[in-house]
Amino acid sequence: MAELFLITAAVLIILLLVYGYLSNGMLAVEHYPLSVWGDGEPIKIVLLADLHGSSFGSGNRRLIQKIQKQSPDIICMAGDMTVKNGKGTGSCLALCKELLEICPVYYAPGNHEIRMECYEHFKVELKKTGVVWLDNAHHDLVIRNRRICVYGLNLEEELYHKFWQKTEFDNGRMEQYLGRAGRESFNLLLAHNPEYFKAYQEWGADLVLSGHVHGGIARLPLLGGVISPSLQLFPAYDAGLFQRGKSRMVLTRGLGTHHIRLRFFNNPEISVINLS
């Protein structure tokens, strides 16, 4: 009986690991309808993050095709599309060129981009493609008579440390990075790390687009994501839609993996935000 139990347990563990590995390719599209203006045509945003050099088909063809089907007005990349050792820079540049055939692309860095030795070169090459690079900067645009200001936040590396090493981050520090939030437009903030949502809300972000957490690697019923990159168990912000006051945050599960190459009940995600 004991031997049968051990064999059964081993088989289940192997099946779980196989499922976790295969889940890396099970690309999902998640929709987030947000009522913002009350009338007029909706504006569609595709959010991508945490690709980490992964590929969905040759040349990321599956990823590109799924995005094309959404017919977005803009595409936002919220960081970690590459890996800190420089892996994935070429495929990221190629992906950006393809996506620019669909619509404008806005890109803010994550903790992996800023740690690359080739970071400065990567930025130059990325700008050459036509991507709007937002390194503690903003870009104003008008879509269907709606004024939108897209901000891109680049946090210092210390703000990505483990949870017991974290430093304070508040509205004051936000203004040091980005200045004061505009009052005449819809403020869209690309901020890779979602842990500082409170500061983003107090600063004046209407909508935050974030990543970094990878959905918590594994997701459990009722409990949500299991662990964050800062090693926080069952983090408050793991994946999905969150709200503080009038500010909302869409936190994608991301596209790729890094240290742990498995996903459990946590498929990679293309996030589609419909502002209406």
Image (cartoon, grey):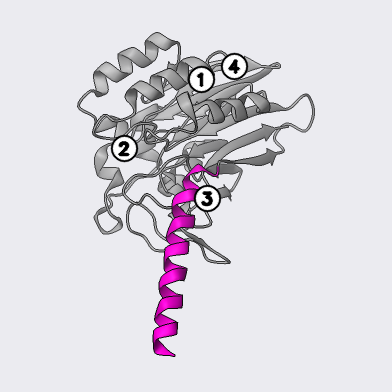
Q: Which residues are magenta?
A: 1-26
The residue tagged 2 is 111
The residue tagged 3 is 239
Cα–Cα span, label 3 and label 1: 22 Å
The residue tagged 4 is 102
The residue tagged 1 is 105
Cα–Cα span, label 2 and label 1: 19 Å
Q: Amino acid at mark 4?
A: Ile
Specify the quadrant of the image occupied by residue 155.
top left
Residue in view at x 24 percent, y 43 percent: 158
Q: Is residue 102 above or below residue 27?
A: above
Specify the quadrant of the image occupied by residue 163.
bottom left
> Considering only order in the chain, which callout, 1 or 3, is on the residue closer to the N terminus?
1
> Considering only order in the chain, which callout, 2 or 4, is on the residue closer to the N terminus?
4
Observer able to see residue 182: no
Residue in view at x 26 percent, y 59 percent: 164
Q: Which mark is residue 185?
A: none
- The x, y position of residue 205, in whole percent, is 52, 35
Query: Mark 4–mark 3 contact, CB under 8 Å?
Result: no
- The x, y position of residue 15, in whole percent, is 47, 63
Query: Mark 2–mark 3 contact, CB under 8 Å?
Result: no
Cα–Cα span, label 4 and label 3: 26 Å
Specify the quadrant of the image occupied by residue 231.
bottom left
Observer able to see residue 98: yes
> Considering only order in the chain, which callout, 3 or 4, is on the residue closer to the N terminus?
4
Q: Is residue 241 above or below residue 192?
A: below
For label 3, the SS is: loop
Query: Mark 2–mark 1 contact, CB under 8 Å?
Result: no
